[in-house]
Amino acid sequence: MKKAKASLAVLLSTSLLFGCAQENEGTKPADDKAKQKSVSKLDDVSNEYREYAINEIEEFVKATEEFTAAVSAGDSKKAKELYAPARMHYERAEPIAEVFGDLDPKIDARKGDVKDEEWGGYHRIEMGLWQENTTKGYEKYAKQLMSDVNLLRAKVETVEVTPDLLITGAVDLLNEVSTSKVTGEEDRYSHTDLYDFVANVEGAEKIFELLTPALKEKDAKLAEEIQQRFDEVYALLEKHKKGDGYISYTDLKKPEVKELSQAIDALAEPLSQIGIVTEGS
């Protein structure tokens, strides 16, 4: 669940990017054709991202079905194993999932984000599994979570993916990492924050990947720098892999947390320029 939207103000300038630039009287036909071609390319990018996000939500539904079934069956061991991998699908597609402001807190709110009597979703069950080491009494939360995730899947078809949403989402995903994942606040009971960390970065990279051809036409050097920063983040994360997953956040040493935080900041800065360099398309 998002905690900050600090990047939004910066990225609002990207609204100028796609179709908001006003024509002046001296605009030449050739310029018009070039702009139309550019807008068409960006529309294609939006459509490709929409397809990617819907696929992630579909996988999220399947993973949540397994997770909630384990909770309802009282299989806490299996539920613990499924918890973090299931959430990764949601974290990758968060720019789309969070469009539905009523569903996001029901699925992803942490304790304190909403009133206690309204608190449910993944993190409520996380508390039961790790802090209380039980599924007893959490069956109702599992049932409600599954219902909310199914509703998300139904609604996601209605989302209009605009270039603004897409680009803002890329940097907001990194803000998510900076404000909650790298601090260990997101998964405070399971300490599986690195899974969410990786998924947020992967979601941001997907957006960058789709925009790379357009970006290279404007600023190839910036595109190269962003890719290099992504590679550096992944290299750091690779050191913390354990089997098919990642070590507990509590196993990270302070210098390692600082290293990850600095790498995310170093990536977020050039990534935030995507909209600026494509301005005027």
Image (cartoon, grey):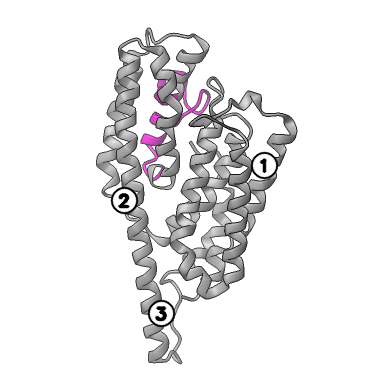
Query: Mark 2 to mark 3: distance in Å?
Result: 25 Å
Name the outermost residue toward the right: 255
Q: CA distance from mark 2 to mark 1?
A: 32 Å
Q: Is residue 189 above or below residue 195?
A: above
Picture quadrant of residue 194? top right
The residue sitting at 42% across, 61% down in the picture is 163
- Identity of the residue drawn at 54% across and 74% down: 218
Could you say whether the residue bearing mark 2 is in a helix, strand or loop?
Answer: loop
In the rendered image, residue 197, in percent from the top left (x then y), is placed at 54, 38
Quick check: is 189 in the magenta stretch? no
Q: Tell me the tag on residue 261.
A: 1
Counting from the top left corner in percent of width and height, residue 21 is at: 46, 75
Q: Which is closer to the viewer, label 1 or label 3?
A: 1
| Boundaries of the magenta span | 98-122
Identify the residue under disc 2. Answer: 159
Crowding near the residue tagged with mark 2, few <14, some 14–19, many ≥20 C-alpha atoms within 10 Å: few
